[in-house]
Amino acid sequence: MAAAACRHRGATGDGAKTFVLLLAAVLRGLRAAGGAGRALPDFERRVLEPAAALGLRRHLLSAFPGEEAEPRVDLAALEALLDAYLRGRVGPGERRRLARLCREYLGRCAARRPPALRLLGRHFEALHAAVPGLPLDGSAVLPGVVLRRDFAAYSPASGAAGAVVVTEPLHAGPSAPGVELVVGSEGQYEAARRWCEARTEAAVKRLRSSNVGLLLSSVKQQDVVIYYAKLYGVSVVECLSSEEVALVREITGVSPYSPFGDNGCSEITDTAAVTFCRPLLLGSKRYAHIGFASSACAFQPHCLVLCGPVDGVNEQHAAAVQGAFTMLQQLFKTVDGREECRSKGESQSDASDVCSRHSSATQKQLTVENIYCNSNQVSEHQLKTHRGETDTQIVDSALKGSENPAGIQTASQIPSNPASHSEELNVPCRGAGSSTDAQKPHAKCEHSGEMHKGYESDLPVDNQKNYGTAVLTTDNANTVTVCERLDVGKDLEKASCGIIPFKHEEGCVSVAQNYSSSIIEAGSVLPVGGYFEILLHYYIQYYAKQLQQSAVTVISSVVADALLIIPKSLHGTTEGNSFAKFYLKTTNALRKNQPLPVNEKGLESVYCKYQLVISVLHCVTELLSIDLIIGVKRPLQKIEDNDSDDDL
Amino acid sequence: MSRLEAKKPSLFISDPLTKDTVSQSLSLLNRILKSCYGPAGRLKQLHNGVGGYVCITSQSSAILGRLSVSHPVLKVLTASVQNHIARFSDCGLFTAILCCSLIENFKSLHVPSCTVIKISKHLLSLCTDYLKSEACGCRVSVDFSNLKTLLCLARSILTSKPACMLNATEVDHLAMLIVKAFMFTIPCHVETKAVLGKCVTVPVKGRRVLDSTVLPGLLIETPEIQFAKLLSVKRISSDTIKIALFCVSMSGDLFNPEEGTITVHHRISLEMSELNQLLNVGKQLVNDEVGLVVCQKVIHPSLKQYLKENQVMAVDRAGLSVMEPLSQMTGSKPIASIHSFSPSCYGSLKDVCTKSFGSKHFVHLIPNDTVVCSLVLCNRNETAWDELKRACETAEHVLQLTIKEPLALLGGGCTESHLASYVRYKTCSLSTSSFKDADCSQTQYQLIADAFCRSLESVACSLSHDDEILTDMVYGHCWLVPSGFPSVSNWSDLLSKCGCGINSNTQNLNWRLLQPHFGSPTIQSCPKEPSVDAADLLTLDCFAAKYSGLQVAVETANLILDLSCIIEDQN
């Protein structure tokens, strides 16, 4: 489990904790349901994908400003994404500051697209410098690259000249390890040594005459080299780490210069353009601060200087920032739908009924408007019956119920309160109730028209009853409600304008209406705080209901319930049972086709989230197919060839 | 084959701050550091039970570097303070005491840590904004055309280190030397980017402090025998001596580990050939009218003899540390080749002479441009000398920091108590929107603000170890009551000057005891800025160091308060 969680985190930069929580919840649920793991692939294909592609996507926002041909992350969305990402990784005092710094860094590096983000992620080790002992406020973004070495030789005139990278010593003596020098006379030996030094001098001279003012060396150069470099006004930085050399090579496109590789006369052409080159004092250490004119890609190299009271804090911040780059790369990925699923969605009945409805609704304005009117009627109708004082009552009693089981009874026995709602408010109160009996409530929960009846008596008494299935019944809605839900496109967009603050300014578009073949489009984001899980929970149940197959429906309810563990854990840390309130508000909004009640500025990548669910399900499948664990005494070695069965 | 040991499970400690061991060690550390604080601080003797070196000190850099701290929470705290010291040299004790007090005070409030962190961040920004603003009543600007403030800064640092064992005359003498040495390091001709020179400390132990002195240029220690032989040196003109600086060995040694095998035919001596080459170098130096040769490594005796015969002074084994200042002050480039070198590498000196202090003999290199100087530091014994050296280095660093930001803070506890009264004044007149921003109640806010102020005041209170300490309600400064008087007597009869020395007891300032207890009264108006101009004998603290120390202390306290568990790998 831990390895799978780490693998997932390594790939997406996020979600290790969520992974473990969700995995554990799914496994618990499956055990309680008596095991139905075999139907997982089926569930993924028939329920999860439609739920994401048709249900979830209507709520998604885009982090890309629409008008550009090549997508890049919108600046306001970037800060919202970073802020949410850093929330779980750095202390509450530093989070906002670090998110802002990170946004500034990405902006100035011009790294809001995948190639530059990948480069940042790969080379962040060399692109940041940590300064312990300074307050966090000292952190800054500096142009250029800060090499973690002082100049071995520095001449101020060497800025605005070229730079070369060397990976071998510029000076070699007359003999070398493994080479035997036979000396025939004193003069010969002296001449040989003189020649060697002259060769070094010529090499440095040649650098200067090729307008190279900076020598970047991955190895330590001998004193003679430094001496000649000083004499001819060439700055030298030596002992660079392999990361630094790799970074310089990548951003400038130069390859290491071999001093004795050619005839030694021609001008050196493979040089990197340097805009400035100066010593930099950070903390109590001196570094070489070098500006490169970027050549390779649009990437503008900058250095992130992280200050913190102790090294550990800086390391934590650097790791969080580097993880954020990986996370941001995921934003540009799409989850593609399968061919079979799509064709089925268009032609088959049952679940595809909804699909076709949806596609037609998005394609034909007329239908949309028609349905829109319908839904308006429904909403109004529901408003009359449920809204107002009943709603607050429900919330109150739900809260009471969380402490006192008896409260449930009072809650569900409110006269004239529609059953669908009273059931739902019980959900949070039960906590992680196990779905021991999935079929029974399903049978009971047949709806009768627009109102649900007859639950006041059984539900509250039976504590064992699964809340998930109770919710399921409410989804057993008539066609009108379906239409109402399908219609959210316009409605949501309109409403969420007011909710997501950057929307107006930066033009964050709701992707709800442009339907394409992918399940989740690039750039899709949702507010953080469990909205993804609640939405997926809701739509999984919705689409599962269209199926007759029992194994898949069982899994659907297990996964749907398991998903709730995430918002539950998120809201569990704050005082009181705010999860109940949150759950109720969100599902109510969903049912009434209202915009999600979001008071959250942070955003998260839906691709990461969806991938996490898929990874968890794959991990579950893998775990469930293990039937025996054999402990062995000695550590297992990675076996290269496969013919080692006799080792057992 | 390596032995396989069973892997130990990691140690998990939840809510480390609620554990007794942590609070006990934290309060012990706090008490140790508090008792060291200020001119009347108690000394600590640090030694290993096995024997060896004994360190007597009251400086945080020496204590924290030698103290073994085992608990992870305390490790974070000490590491944080040590990093601060590495950067600023000064205000280590201030940072450490403030951080410990903040943790202790905040912890006892039983307010959720995220609220504490948010509010303390806000209070910190209140302080830093105030310190940076023109209206700040506890800072003075430093005038570099007048040495008085610089002397005050240096004197304050020396007096706050009682383990240096200095009397008032010695403090004045050393403060003057430190400022003089600092003045030497400021380049006369400033180009676009000024780079400060270097002050090299030369240890002379077992002599009186008043024998300490500052000399322009460098002192290179030489053995006595050689000292006697130093003859007159060849000069270009009456005040110019050409100098050549070598960073390669001139011993004629052939051994070079990086090279491979050398097969030598019979009757060929490479040593002779090498020595010949060295003598060629000597010839070139003589021809070029070089008067002084300094080599980082060893010079062959024959070459030395040859140079001496030609009135060229040769100093060898100079060591790596003098190479950079030497090259800086003479303008010479260290030569790394004995086969070819150009005359452009030579530098120049004004004069060379010999000096001796006690039993030590030195060659004194006097430059034209005095950007490098030597501080000959004397003290009676080794332990006191070490302490004095740390103090002088701190003072030099503080002056360097001050030239970057020409400000100083009032010392003697006045900055802390003034800041505390400012925060108290500001927070009692806070709008309700501030509480909403921080997501807390007004009571919570007041509690946290009070704990913050008490922590600041407890630093000021650490200055007094027996005596009573007061604060006034007008300037918010800190006043020390001389010991031996009953606490009930009329305070205005006993007090003469406040901690920093800027306010005298001329009016009734409405004193109260400065006790870091809950619920101190707030003053009705913003604490005033003293009307007097910088007087002669002020106690001043480094602005940059205290400003950063304040931030580091609050941030470290927040970091520690935010710890909800510790997972320790025991393998």
Image (cartoon, rainbow, N blue to C red):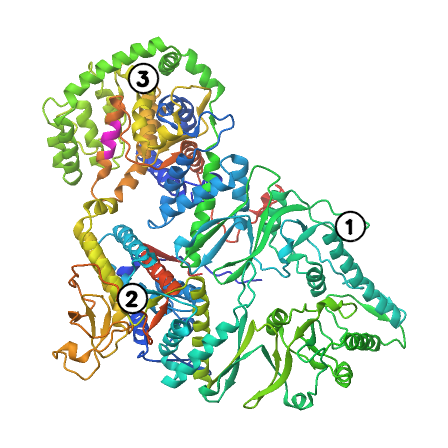
Q: Kindly identify which numbered label has been placed on residue A487.
A: 3
Asked whether the beta carbons under mark 3 and mark 1 sit within 8 Å of each other, the answer is no
Asked if B40 appears above or below A473 in the picture, the reply is below
Tell me how far mark 2 sits from mark 3, CA to CA: 65 Å
Q: Chain of mark 2?
A: B
Asked if A84 appears above or below A379 in the picture, the reply is below
Q: Chain of mark 3?
A: A
At 72% from the left and 77% from the top, the residue drawn is: B236
Q: Kindly identify which numbered label has been placed on residue B128.
A: none
Indicate the amino acid at tag 1.
Gly
Query: Residue A27, image x and y in percent?
Result: 36, 37
Asked if B370 appears above or below B377 in the picture, the reply is above
Query: Residue B229, image x and y in percent?
Result: 69, 89
Q: Check disc 3 and report its element: helix, strand or loop.
A: loop
Q: Kindly identify which numbered label has been placed on residue A261.
A: 1
- Let me know if residue A454 appears in the view: no
